[in-house]
Image: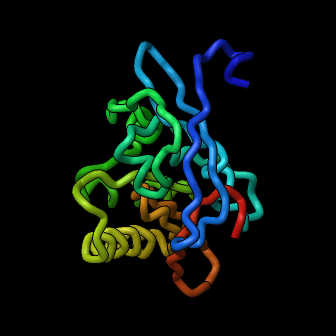
């Protein structure tokens, strides 16, 4: 498809890792945009949220640099171009990459008010359990102000958080999402 669109690309391939339960090699694309190389793994994005009724498209693995892709991908088994630019990944381009907790709160409040799903990337330091707890408290607070309950899912390696508010009286939930090549 990238060839048909005239986007330069090569296939990146990583090895398996039986110790981690990774049975198969995995491939994705490295694309060249504006003279700069980026990792793009539509397969991992496609496996996120597949249990939901909606056919939501995710972009957690669009335009990643080497440091981000290898958070949850095995090392390459063949040479590939270096992907060093971390300024143009999808969520940063869409102004959905936050460094301040107050931005998480403001955007969560908007999502609760408008009934929209909020998917954002956290880049305000490492997403530790303590930081996540603080972010979840702000997400909960935003929902409380609009009489909504938050359902949250997290792609931990990529620090991407999905928030959906509901009017229904349901138990608040936090789910860890696991992107993969389709094999469980």
Q: Is residue 55 above or below residue 165?
A: above
Q: Is residue 159 left or right of residue 150?
A: left
Work out whether residue 52 or residue 39 is closer to the camera in this orientation and state it: 39
Looking at the picture, the colour scheme in use is rainbow
97 or 170, which lies in front? 97
Above or below, 143 relative to 87: below
Residue reaching furthest to the front = 78
Picture coordinates of residue 173, whole percent (x, y): 53, 80
Residue 124: image quadrant is bottom left
Query: Looking at the image, can residue 155 be seen?
Result: yes
Q: Is residue 24 left or right of residue 103?
A: right
Q: Which residue is more in the foreground, 74 or 109?
A: 74
Residue 128 in the image: above or below residue 75: below
Image side of residue 143 versus residue 40, left or right = left
- Label count reads 0
Residue 64: % across, % down? 43, 39
> Residue at the location (63% across, 43% down)?
27
Q: Residue at x 65, y 65 (%)?
A: 23
Residue 42 x/y as whole percent: 64, 43
Quadrant containing the N terminus in the rendered view: top right
Position of residue 47 measured from the top left corner of the image (x, y, whole percent): 67, 57
Q: Is residue 112 visible?
A: no
Image quarter of the C terminus? bottom right
Q: Residue shown at 48%/18% (left/top)?
A: 33
């Amino acid at each position: 498809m990238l060839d048909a669109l005239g986007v330069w690309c090569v296939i990146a391939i990583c090895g398996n890792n039986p110790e981690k339960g990774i049975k198969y090699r995995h491939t994705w694309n490295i694309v060249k945009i504006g003279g700069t190389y980026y990792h793009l793994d539509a397969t991992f994005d496609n496996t996120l949220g597949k249990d939901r009724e909606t056919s939501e498209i995710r972009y957690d693995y669009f335009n990643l640099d080497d440091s981000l892709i290898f958070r949850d991908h095995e090392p390459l088994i063949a040479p590939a171009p270096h992907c060093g630019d971390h300024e143009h990944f999808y969520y940063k381009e869409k102004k959905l990459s936050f460094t301040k907790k107050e931005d998480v709160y403001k955007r969560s409040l908007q999502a609760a008010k408008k009934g929209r799903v909020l998917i954002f990337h956290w880049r305000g330091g490492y997403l530790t359990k303590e930081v996540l707890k603080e972010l979840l408290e702000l997400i909960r607070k935003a929902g409380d102000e609009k009489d909504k309950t938050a359902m949250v899912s997290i792609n931990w390696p990529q620090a991407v958080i999905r928030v959906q508010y509901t009017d229904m009286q349901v138990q608040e939930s936090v789910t860890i999402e696991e992107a993969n090549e389709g094999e469980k």
